[in-house]
Amino acid sequence: MGGLLLSVAVAVAAVAVLPASPAAALPPGAYTFVVNNGSHNVSVINAATNTVTATISVGESPFAVAVSADGTRAYVTNSFDDSVSVIDTATNAVTATIPVGDNPQAVAVSGTSAYITNVGSNSVSVFDTVTDSVTATIPVGAVPTGVALSDTRAYVTNLGSDSVSVIDTATNTVTSTITVGDAPRAVAVSGTHAYTANLAGDSVSVIDTVIGTVTATIPVGDAPSGVAVSPDGTRAYTTNTNGDSVSVIDTATDAVTATIPVGDGPRSVAVGANGTRVYTSNGQGNTVSVIDTAANTVIATVPVGGAPSGVATTEVGRPAAPLVSAPVEGATTGAFPKFKGKAIGEGGAVDADEVKILDDGGTLLQTVGVRQSDGYFSWLRNGSWPTGDHTVRFVAVRGGLESEETTVNFTVAPGPATPVVTIPAEGAETGPRPKFTGSAPGASQVLVQDLDNMPIGEVSVRSDGYFSWRQATPWAIGPHAVRFVAKNSLGLSAPKDVSFVVHIPAPVVNQPAQESTTGTLPKFSGTAPARSTVEFYEDDVKLGSAGVSSAGKWSWRLTGEMGMWTHWAPGVHHVDVYTNFGGTQSPEHTTVTFTAQ
């Protein structure tokens, strides 16, 4: 076993040191941190592009890395320096270097504590991530090389004693020691099971953490040195250093289901937060292999520094769970509840680009945009909700990262009935100022919207259910559609859509008769839409106008500047007569031809 460790150390010493690139802030996204043992630095890989975006100098011969749950700090063990480098992931800068035990190797972090295995002193250092100081040192087995954390325990692989030390993290004492395979190099924990990669045994030991015993031993590839478990706990991945491969284990059957060729000398392995990617550090190839977990194939090979060893994944700038303000949790609504809220983070800053809305089974119902000025979002389902209990889940999305879910439970009760619109009739022609009337029994208001559910107006409903509404400004000439939605304390009704066509007809001229001969003071009269204005032109020059009565009648004579009737010049005249309604002139006109004498 000592020979295996020594051979690694000799190989690392022969690698040239690469210069570090300047620190730069990480934009929101998923990242992989890779410790380059021979280059004395850390490569930061953007998981979206599979490219190195930063290189951070750390201590001598760094070996492993762990990232805090919130993605703000990375902790790197420096095996030759007997220290831990603390990296601020927002700036990619080392903010502290903390002395720990002799030859630190593995590191795991949870909450405000990090646990570091010290190979040279057969101990574990407990590191307070708030104060950046060592608060306890725990003796364990021989050559501790791996560590993983559960809620209440730390599991340490002792490569020199073929065992796992179980530490109670509340008291920081070893409570049990479990015998596993030959030379356990690394360990991962998921649920009630722990998995150890047994370097000299070419196997993985499966530990039932409830009873503290090995329940299965799974043969894998040659010299497994790293192990990681998918976020859903269904698969374990081991790097086989001498086999240049990764074994995929089905944790339900404890059987290898696939073996994936990777780079040269894979050491550590990490699974991305969403479980779709696996990353291996290839110590002899100076690369990282990126595996698509759906296809179990390598989709990218990323050059990094010298002799990469430790690898960890994280998400930077993950958005906060959205705040849903309506309906409130447990509310009773109508069949058309409107959902609204804000996607904001710390300090009220807008925290997302969009919000995904899913049903209780995880089926996507809709993705809505987030207003960037204040984080507001809203959604109204296209169709009614059935009566009964419902659950809707909201997930904020930014930079490809998804937040935790916000769950809203609500009950749909019978809401107001769909409003009835009696005037205008469906498809009717109206003037530019139509009055809409109808009934909405049981509703307090009627909301008027366009067909995209954008508000146009609203009106109160009388106790007998009657409502009427007229838009403050004239409608443009042409076809229109308006949506009416009844509202009461339970929510909204199904919509009632009304289509109508705004048309301003040309006036009807009854006199003078067409092609008639008149005197020089003829009277013009006829009909037009009630309360409109009739305008008169000759040779595109406006001669005057006349108001139309509520009965739709009008009359007019040519007048002069003083309001006195004015004689028409003897001869033939062609007068164009238009209707003007609310400032909008009719597109058509009536031409009257007569002869004055």
Image (tube, rainbow, N blue to C red):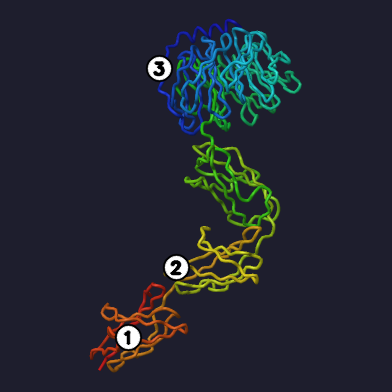
Residue at 44 percent across and 27 percent down: it is 51
Name the amino acid, label 2: Thr
Mark 1 neighbour density, 10 Å: few (under 14) some (14–19) many (20 or more): some
Quarter of image, res 337: bottom right
Give the structural element (helix, strand or loop) at label 2: loop
| Mark 3 / mark 2, whichever is N-terminal | 3
Q: Which mark is residue 19?
A: 3
Earlier residue among tags 2 and 1: 2
Count residues near mark 3 (Cα–Cα under 10 Å), then give few for <14, some for 14-19, many for 20+. few
Choose the circle earlier in sequence order: 1 or 3. 3
The residue that mark 2 highlights is 473
Residue located farthest toward the right when viewing the structure as drawn: 211
What's the CA distance linking mark 2 and mark 1? 32 Å
Where residue 124 sits, quadrant-wise, is top right
Residue holding disc 1: 592
Amino acid tagged 3? Pro
Mark 1–mark 3 Cα distance, whole angstroms, equals: 92 Å
* Camera-nearest residue between 510 and 327: 327
Quarter in which the C terminus is drawn: bottom left
Between the C-alphas of marks 3 and 2, the distance is: 69 Å
What is the residue that sits farthest to the front in this orientation?
562
Of tags 2 and 1, which is closer to the observer?
2
